[in-house]
Amino acid sequence: AQSVTQLGSHVSVSEGALVLLRCNYSSSVPPYLFWYVQYPNQGLQLLLKYTTGATLVKGINGFEAEFKKSETSFHLTKPSAHMSDAAEYFCAVALNNAGNMLTFGGGTRLMVKP
Amino acid sequence: EAQVTQNPRYLITVTGKKLTVTCSQNMNHEYMSWYRQDPGLGLRQIYYSMNVEVTDKGDVPEGYKVSRKEKRNFPLILESPSPNQTSLYFCATRVPRRTGDTQYFGPGTRLTVL
């Protein structure tokens, strides 16, 4: 079974500051890892994902994440926050098997102060 | 345009009154899934379907039913809703045999059971 922990249900940064959203996972087999973003009153959109290959993954809107197997982490970063980044962010893990279940973390709400 | 649609988007009902939330996709994806989103818990999978007439339980199936009679539709049925089923519900689709593929989410259905 797999699980995902997102540290910090709320994160507040100033506009222009570094964004760091933390995600740790547990998995018995090599995982696929995802970050999704949810803007108010909308569904989830994929920001980026790691499946195989390069461990530093770049996504949309200037976000990137690095898969660190030794730390079982997949933290999301953005060098400079923008007001439009205010949203809820979900880390998720899927196993490479036929079960196809995507397991989500509890979510982190990012607030950006002017 | 690739789309996942859900209806209704908002629903207030009373305990015990059967309801159905519809989900439809135009991407010809075989895999469809239902999630519920609750504060602090992220998204939890209710049921999923690998193909027509093939459905399986997710993490939290109690109190829910699904059917998959055709590829494009995957309705979620609450035979006797209870207040603990008040939640935000999302339908999602993707190609089933490629676990690393992106899931596409519908806009969500906010259900309140009084």
Image (cartoon, coloured by chain):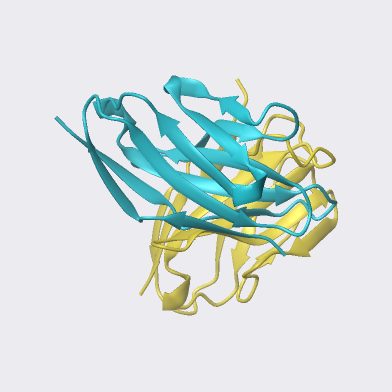
Chain colours: A cyan, B yellow
Quadrant of the image occupied by residue B18: bottom right
- The image shows residue A48, relative to residue B59, as above or below, that is above
Percent across and percent down for residue A22 are 45, 47
- The image shows residue B110, relative to residue B84, as above or below, that is above
Q: Which residue is at a point 60% across and 55% down the rendered structure image?
A: A25
Q: Disc count in the image? A: 0
Q: Which residue is at a point 71% across and 29% down the rendered structure image?
A: B27
Percent across and percent down for residue B92 are 62, 44
Q: Which residue is at a point 47% across and 37% down the rendered structure image?
A: A76
Residue situated in front as seen by the camera: A27 or A82 = A27
Percent across and percent down for residue A52 are 75, 33
Residue A68 lies left or right of residue A75; in this view the side is right
Quadrant of the image occupied by residue B106: top right
Residue A75 lies left or right of residue A110; in this view the side is right
Quarter of the C terminus of chain A within the rendering: top left
Q: Is residue A96 visible?
A: yes
- The image shows residue A63, relative to residue B94, as above or below, that is above
Percent across and percent down for residue A49 are 62, 34
Quarter of the N terminus of chain A within the rendering: bottom right
Residue situated in front as seen by the camera: B46 or A61 = A61
Residue situated in front as seen by the camera: A114 or B101 = A114
Q: Is residue B104 visible?
A: no
Q: Which residue is at a point 62% across and 25% down the rendered structure image?
A: B2
Residue A101 lies left or right of residue B69; in this view the side is left
